[in-house]
Image (cartoon, rainbow, N blue to C red):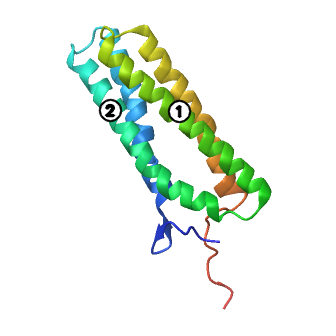
């Protein structure tokens, strides 16, 4: 079954999730560059804005993900999909708290960096579940035409 949220057979959710994942990981890298004293205060700003961009990107990616989730018919796959969604929403909520804290705490605060690390752990777990859905269970994968002819 191919993804109902796709363009010309290409599912949108896996395309869109690359942006928040990349932005959140770069946010941690920017935090560490700032915390270790390399490059100056601009890296704190980079961490802040990449974290914010990751939140926006995750919310955009969630819509086609939800469309894919509601189209899953197999109960085991749907259960995995629900866990995938819940963990992603926890990560987004954590990053929203992190964003708010960064507006009210000193730059390079250890709590913000810790929350970012926890958020990445959440998206790693969720990514594993997403991989289970696609690569093991074949969810949202369009079967190729018969190649034997």
Image quarter (top left, top right, bottom left or bottom right) of the N terminus? bottom right
**Residue annotated with mark 1:** 91
Q: Residue 9's spot in the image, x, y percent?
A: 50, 73
108 is higher (above) or lower (below) than 73: above
Left or right placement of residue 49 versus residue 89 in this view: left
Residue 116 point in image, percent of width and height = 46, 23
**Residue pointed to by mark 2:** 50
Query: Callout 2 environment at 10 Å: few (<14), some (14 to 19), or many (20+)?
Result: many
Q: Secondary structure at mark 1?
A: helix
Q: Quadrant of residue 68?
A: bottom right
Is mark 2 in CB contact (under 8 Å) with mark 1? Answer: no
Identify the element where label 2 is drawn: helix
Q: Is residue 145 above or below residue 120?
A: below
Residue at (45%, 51%) from the top-left corner? 61
> Which residue corresponds to the image point at 27% horizontal and 26% vertical from the top-left?
46
Rendered position, 6 above or below 121: below
- The quarter of the displayed image where residue 147 is located: bottom right
Label 1: few (<14), some or many (≥20) within 10 Å? many
Quadrant housing residue 106: top left
């Amino acid at each position: 079954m191919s993804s109902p949220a796709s363009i010309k057979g290409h599912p949108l959710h896996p395309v869109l999730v690359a942006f928040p994942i990349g932005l959140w990981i770069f946010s941690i890298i920017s935090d560490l560059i700032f915390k270790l004293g390399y490059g100056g205060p601009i890296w704190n700003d980079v961490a802040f804005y990449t974290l914010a961009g990751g939140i926006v990107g995750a919310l955009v990616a969630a819509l086609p993900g939800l469309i894919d989730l509601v189209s899953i018919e197999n109960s085991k796959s749907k259960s995995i999909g629900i866990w995938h969604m819940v963990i992603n929403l926890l990560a987004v909520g954590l990053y929203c708290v992190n964003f708010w804290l960064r507006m009210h705490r000193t730059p390079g605060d250890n709590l913000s960096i810790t929350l970012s690390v926890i958020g990445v752990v959440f998206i790693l777990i969720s990514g594993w579940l997403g991989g289970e859905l696609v690569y093991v269970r074949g969810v949202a994968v369009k079967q190729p035409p018969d190649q034997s002819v």
